[in-house]
Amino acid sequence: MAGIKLHGDYLSQPVRALGIMLRACSIPFEFVYRNFAKGDYKSEEYTKLNPLQRMPTLEVEGFPYIIESNAALQFLAELDGVPEHWYPRGRKERLLVNMYLAWHGPDMRRCSAAYAWQEYVGEFLEGRKFKEEDVLKAKEDMDHMLDQLDTIWLKDMVYLAGDEITIADIQCITEIAQLFPTGYEVVTNRPNLAAYTERVKARLQPHYDIVSKAPISELRAGYIKLKSKK
Ligand SMILES: N[C@@H](CCC(=O)N[C@@H](CS)C(=O)NCC(=O)O)C(=O)O
């Protein structure tokens, strides 16, 4: 397919998810860098693509701008030539993918992004500070959510929808990755999640590292700098 552009900054989880998917499926695309820290997503020009003023935006010739990462992943997975396992057509597997994607935004992402933002990303990127009690509450919510991931979603599962990797796993691993810079023990006492994160990262190589390594290191450096000031 001609003319695919990914607008965003790999500091953002859903932007990384799309970058990994495009690369893993060998779909040619142009990466249009939009500086998150400088607020490019609020610019007049970007707002014309994405009136929600969020990253990512996937621009595909002949289609409306895709301004939700789940929809973008589903769209990409259904392009000609993309292996079916990314978004399986089997009813059971597709149901499992769709169920996870429905949980991802309001549960996984709400908790992990809220914690990461309040713990360090908000201050690192936008100089915003949060009350200690709010950060602790966000951490409690995140712990509960990670327990659910470990004991419900990943119970007896290789990947979230069965024995093969899907777009649900890309969303999940990229979201979890933003917790690593804090040194927070994401997988301690969560054996299913521990094995799963290693499995998914390995399965997505080299694309996972190409897309994630630099931004996660940048976030880690930012975190260390912030904490060393306190
Ligand atoms: N539901 C959206 C969420 C996108 C999102 O929250 N993007 C963040 C960056 S990770 C953003 O652009 N935030 C700017 C803002 O909300 O002001 C998706 O999955 O694409």
Image (cartoon, rainbow, N blue to C red):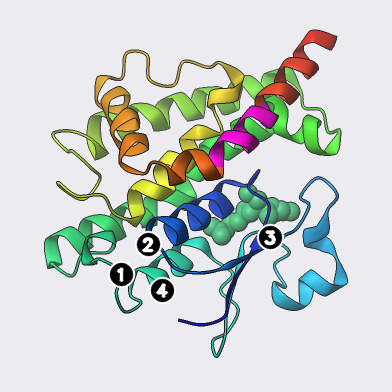
Amino acid under label 4?
Phe
Residue 215 falls within the magenta-colored stretch: yes
> How far is disc 3 from disc 4 in space, using C-alphas?
19 Å
Q: Mark 3 falls on what kind of element?
A: loop
Q: Which is in the foreground here, disc 2 or disc 3?
A: 2
Cβ atoms at labels 3 and 4 below 8 Å apart = no
Q: Position of residue 176 (x, y in %)?
A: 47, 34
Q: Position of residue 147 (x, y in %)?
A: 34, 26
Q: Which is nearer the N-term, disc 3 or disc 4?
A: 3
Left-right relation of 204 to 110: left
Query: Within 10 Å of the Cα at label 4, are there few (<14), some (14-19), or many (20+) other Cα atoms?
Result: few
> How far is disc 1 from disc 3 in space, using C-alphas?
27 Å
Q: Position of residue 214 (x, y in %)?
A: 63, 35
> How far is disc 2 from disc 3 in space, using C-alphas?
24 Å
Which residue is found at the position 51% from the left and 23% from the top? 140
Mark 3 and ligand 1: say if the CB distance to the nearest ligand atom is below 8 Å: yes
Judging depth in this view, the residue of 205 and 112 nearest the camera is: 205
Q: Which is nearer the N-term, disc 4 or disc 1?
A: 4
Predominant secondary structure in magenta?
helix
Residue 56 falls within the magenta-colored stretch: no
Amino acid under label 2?
Cys
The residue where tag 1 is placed is 82
Query: Within 10 Å of the Cα at label 1, are there few (<14), some (14-19), or many (20+) other Cα atoms?
Result: some
